[in-house]
Structures are given as structure tokens and as C-alpha cells.
Amino acid sequence: MKRLLLPLLLFLPLAAIADDCLLRGTGDLGVVIERATGSLQVVDTTAHKALFRVEGLGDLSHASVVYSRDERYAYVFGRDGGLTKVDLLCGRIAKRIVQGGNSIGGAISQDGRLVAVSNYEPGGVKVFSSDDLSLVADIPATRTVKGKGSKTVGLVDAPGERFVFSLYDTGEIWLLGMKDPAHPRLTKFAGIGRQPYDGLVTPDGRYYIAGLFGEDGLAKLDLWHPEKGVERILDHYGKGEQKLPVYKMPHLEGWAIAGNRAFFPAVGHHEVLVMDMESWKEIGRIPVHGQPVFVMARPDGRQLWVNFAFPDNDTVQVIDSESLKIVDTLKTGKGTLHMEFTPRGEEVWISVRDKDEVQIYDTDTRKLKGRLQARKPSGIFFTDRAHKTGL
Amino acid sequence: MVRTLSLLLGLTICPSSSWAAAPSPARQQELLYLLHQDCGACHGMRLKGGLGPALTPENLSALSEAQIQQTILEGRPGTPMPPWKPFMSPEEAGWLADRLKQGKTTE
């Protein structure tokens, strides 16, 4: 009861501002998802304050956000199949639809005209106009033996007005070409490995990589040469080693790349893996505090910030990408769910669910610079994602 | 019928099923919080499903309480469902299974 009341009281004044639209740029804005209450806050990363709270976004467990190319609108993908277009300047919902049973994530096309949503249930991907959220294409997933559509995960955008995603139950990667929205072109890659649980595209948009839960290694598709098919990389990783249970699935989104090295969470091992981007070979493992969930590179690539799955989700570790040493361990608090760097990386914003707050750190000194109250915050998404492939 | 079956299974698989002493009220709150927040990471905060299936009474109707308790404690090897026995006792898992069966999971 106390837990509920406190943040509510703190936030009463916010609602009152929501009437007038702001006249300002949006390059230093972002949103903080408040997952338990189906709301979000529009935040200003320069002023360190919340501008608006927007409510009525439905079930936001595991919500993710992409931005329109003018950085004015946030598209919020909710667990209940809701797709909501939020106007950051006016602090209100511009349009909301419920497009499917149970969605997991989305992406915006290269030209910003299309928003794609992937669904756990009934599986598959739907593509909408980013303008009015009208349906443009409906791509059902392969049926599983139980007759349901395969859960669809790891949806990203890629150059050439394409979307790429993976099918968890049937072990496939699909490439969806939307150059001509009236005639979607689908290329399917089967037998890519068991239980792909998430996917990413490298920041240059060239490689799509799916993480596999059901076996070792990752599945890699070269989007410059899809005709070459899907290749397995790192398949020796973890072979013959006892895996630890995983209490929250790691995320591959926004793969941390620093120089020619990529860093990502191991699955079932308390390690961050280091891979050489030229040979696609593992070149190191960094032992860390728990099962990593997000491994995020500071925009300059010098540091990696890592958070962890239950029961170690009260900690964030900072790794120096050059020496591969852990340079700091921060006790942020239980339910540390997400981290987001300001566009040039001088600060990182961290959501701490059980403290109902977002903590703002200076990334050089790792000193806490500020706090923002939020109700059970989860994802934090800043508008500079608008211009990044795969985010 | 389902009830008798679950009793039988409960007795054979795990003698300490849900009719054993219920967790203290404070622990009950913790377990329900865990259910929505941490189980919710895979099953959805509202337990409507995600990577893992929905944990609603309808969806769980084919499973007995004891089977659910067993799944929670031991996980499902070969799938992402992890074992929770390091974090709760068999009694507590049985209590959660009972709540899930009844759909009484609000905190």
C-alpha cells in the first residue's frame, strides 16, 4: 500500500501540464516506460526532468519503443498487442490500436513510413503505416505441430526497406522486403538452429544475428548476400559446459560494438563474450556478477555497461573495453532493468524498478548525478534511436 | 476428479503439496510480487503469456496443482523455464500453484 501511494503523490503535478503542446526540439527527449501502470513519462535529458506522463498504454511488460524520423513521435509496442503512437511535444496519444494478441517488439522502416510489430500470439508480423497505423501487410508465421503460429522474435529493420525476424518454435529467420508495400517479398531461411530467442542487426545494417537458446552458437545472416544463407558462428561456445539456469532472457538488441570487437551476454554462464568482428571468432570471456541481460557500449565504445537477471538484478558492472577489466560495480538497487546512454554518452540513465526511480550517472566518474521518480520503470528510450538502424 | 488426481499425484510426487501450512502473509506478498515481476519477465506481467505460455486457470487446466508445483520447482529442462527451488520451498511453490489454478494472483 505504501509502495503504491508514494509515487502517486509525487506525481500529481505532472498531469496538470499536459494541456499545451511544447514548441521546442526533441533531440534531447526520451521516454521512460512505467510498466505496471501502463504509462510512460516523456523526459528531458538536458534538464533531467519529466515533461509529461502519458497513460492508457495497456500492458507494458517487455515494452519497446521506436521513433519517427522527425523524433516527434514514439511508437510503443505493448505486451497486449497494443501499438500506440505518442506525441512527445503534446504529451498525449496521437493514435492507438490493438493489433494482435501478444506482441513483443517492433521496428520502423528505413524511410520511416512503416512500423512492423512481431507477435508471440498468434505469431507473425504485421506492418502498419507509421502515419495513421492502418494495416499495410499481415505476415502469419509458420504453424507449429500444435497448430499455433510460431512465436516471432528479434524483429529489426534493415537497409532497403526490409525487416528481419526469427521464429522461435520453428527455428527460422525470415527476411521481409517492403520496398513495394502492396507486394511484400518474403525470403525464408529454415533450420537455422533451435529456439532463436532474440535477434539484432549490426549498426551498419549488414548482419542479422539471432541468439539460440536451444543450442550453442548464434545464427548469422549477411544481408548483403542473403543468397549465401545462414551461417553458424561461435558454435563451440559453451560446449560440454554445464549451463546455469537463466531467470531472465538476455537481450541482443543494440549489440555492443567497440572497435572491431563485439560484446554480448552469454546464455547460462555468468560471462560477457568478446568476439572479433572480422573472423567472427570468440576472443575472450569476461567473468561478471551474474547472468547478463543487457551489454551496452557507451557511444564512444570505451565502456560497456552490463545489468543482470534475477537474482542479481540489483547490480550494474562497467567494463573497460580496452583492458576487458571490470572498472566499477554499482549497487543500483533491486529490479535494475534497463540502461540508456545520452546520445553522446556522457550520462547513462538506469531504471530501478523496486525503488520506483531512474538513476542518472556520469559515465566517467560513475557518480550519481540525479534521480527521477517513476512508477516501476522498465525500458528507457531516447530519441536519437530514430536515426539508428536496428533500434 | 481433477482434484482427486492432483491429490494422488501430490502424495506420490511431493508429499508437501499446497494444503501444508500456507506462507506467512508477508511472504505471500513477496511471492505474488515475484510472480508478476520475475515470472512475468517470461510469462507477462499480467501472466497472459510471453516466451512462456499464459499462466491463467484456463491455460493451466490440463495440469494438476502438483504438476505445476513440480514445474515451478524443477523447471522444464531443454526449455527456458528455469528451476525456482533455490528461491522458494516446496510449500511455497505449492501455494503459488494453488493461486495460479484459482486465478487469485493479485497482490
Image: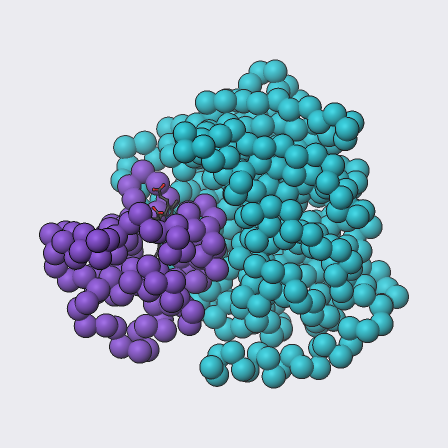
**Number of marks in the image?**
0
The residue lying at 75 percent from left, 47 percent from top is A133
As drawn, the chain in cyan is: A
* Residue sitting nearer the eye, A355 or A302: A355
Judge left or right: residue A106 versus residue A168: right
Q: Residue furthest top?
A: A227
Applied colour scheme = by chain
* Residue sitting nearer the eye, A185 or B106: B106
User: Residue A196, relative to residue A314: is it above or below?
Assistant: above
Which quadrant would the C terminus of chain A be assigned to in this image? top right
The x, y position of residue B58, in whole percent, is 39, 53
The residue lying at 48 percent from left, 79 percent from top is A3
The x, y position of residue A234, in whole percent, is 43, 29
User: Residue A253, relative to residue A328: is it above or below?
Assistant: above
| Residue A167 visible here | yes
The shade of chain B is purple
Q: Residue furthest front?
A: B1
User: Residue A248, relative to residue A16: is it above or below?
Assistant: above
The residue lying at 54 percent from left, 72 percent from top is A356
The residue lying at 31 percent from left, 38 percent from top is B78
The x, y position of residue B27, in whole percent, is 31, 74
The x, y position of residue A186, in whole percent, is 64, 24
Judge left or right: residue B106 versus residue B9: right
Q: Residue furthest right?
A: A23
Judge left or right: residue A24 versus residue A369: right
Judge left or right: residue B9 versus residue A270: left
| Residue A366 visible here | no
* Residue sitting nearer the eye, A127 or A249: A127
* Residue sitting nearer the eye, A252 or A7: A7
